[in-house]
Amino acid sequence: MRIIAWLVTLGLMTAAVDAQVQPILTEDAAKVSGHVWAIMGFPNIAIVVGGNATLVIDTGLGPRNGATIAKVAKKLAPHNKLYLTTTHFHPEHAAGEPGFPAGTILIRNRTQQEEMDKHGEELIKQFAGRNDQWGELLADVKLRPPDETFEKERKLDLGDAVTARLLWFGGAHTKGDELIFVDPDKTLISGDVVQNKIVPGISNDGGTPSSWIAVLEQVEKLGALHVLPDHSAMGDGSLVVSEKTFITAVRMRALDLKRDGVNAEDAGMLLTAEFKAKYADWPINSLTNFVKSIYAE
Ligand SMILES: [Zn+2]
Ligand SMILES: [Zn+2]
């Protein structure tokens, strides 16, 4: 049931940002910072280019998109070794892996891989059933085990003093959310954990509102200058604080209402209206699912 509720949320959320639902990625790469490029789409893909190695973050929905990203990465640095990692196990972030060339080194955190083993195929099936185009993009996708997993942090040296730290701070949107921090750019690839004015969504079996806040406290310490979220526009380091402020404020108000005996459904409606007024520049459809997660903790 929760997965269906979450898919509905995703549908509503993405409908508001039209360019962000187009599932066929293009070869247009925009510069995020000195060593980081992005293909903006569903989802935004990051390509980090060092002196002898390139790291791609996320795969797009199915192998056709994976192949497009690999082509762009090759154009940016034809002779670099290729690493691939994923911000979380959802199909538009991870199911394009078979489109990458043989020899690509796939790395992700252990918690994310456990979620993938548990729910990966089931979610690909659900996404494939949503419409003909998604079905085509996800046809015959076979997931492979990663070449490497890590517990909390894996630092990749990409050459020419460019490094990427692959980080797992705990559960938020999913249990295995991975964040990537690139030096010397101080660029954060934030997945769903830090978005740009998007209502947070906890997927089936994901983290909790308070674990999400705890993750953001760790992210804050990184001191990011640039942030590339996966389903919204890029921004500066202030996105991290905005995300934490928003989630903390919704949580405090929801706990107030819970203490007053208001049920979760009514609290969701009340807080949706309240935050639509308070955050007029956020496209807020509904806070009810997130409020329910707060009540459930
Ligand atoms: Zn997701
Ligand atoms: Zn996504």
Image: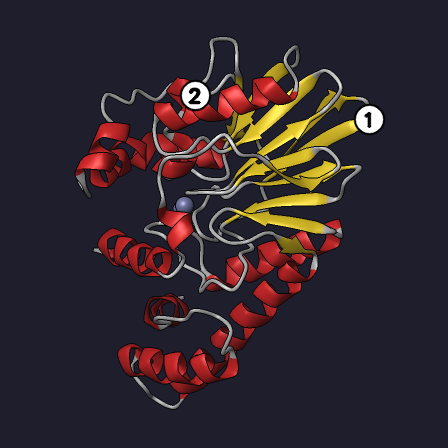
Q: Residue at x 45, y 36 (%)?
A: 112
Which kind of residue does numbered mark 1 sit on?
Answer: Ala
Looking at the picture, how far across and down is residue 39, in whole percent?
A: 53, 37
Ligand 2 shown in quarter: top left
Q: Which residue is mark 2?
A: 67
Question: Residue 250, relative to residue 201: is it above or below?
Answer: below
Residue at 68%, 62% (x, y): give it: 238
Q: Dot 2: what SS?
A: helix
Q: Please provide percent x and percent y for residue 123.
A: 27, 38
Local SS, label 1 = loop
Residue 14 location, quadrant: bottom left
Judging from the image, the colouring scheme is secondary structure
Label 2: how many Cα within 10 Å (few below 14, some 14–19, many 20+): many
Which label lies toward us, 2 or 1?
A: 2
Question: Farthest residue toward the bottom?
Answer: 260
User: Residue 154: where, in percent of width, then height?
Assistant: 65, 29
What amino acid type should be assigned to the residue bearing mark 2? Ala
The mark found on residue 161 in the picture is 1
Mark drawn on residue 19 = none
From the viewer's perspective, is 148 left or right of 226?
Answer: left
Cβ atoms at labels 2 and 1 below 8 Å apart: no
Q: Nearer the viewer, residue 169 or 91?
A: 91
Examine the image and state in which quarter residue 2 appears. bottom left
Query: Could you give the CA–CA distance between mark 2 and mark 1, rounded to whole angstroms?
Result: 28 Å
Where is residue 100? Give x, y as percent. Answer: 45, 18
Q: Please say if 123 is above or below 76.
A: below
Which residue is found at the position 51% from the left and 77% from the top? 279
Label 1 packing within 10 angstroms: few (<14), some (14-19), many (20+)? few
Would you say the beta carbon of the disc 2 residue lies within 8 angstroms of ligand 2?
no
Q: Quadrant of the N terminus?
A: bottom left
Of pointers 2 and 1, the one earlier in the residue sequence? 2
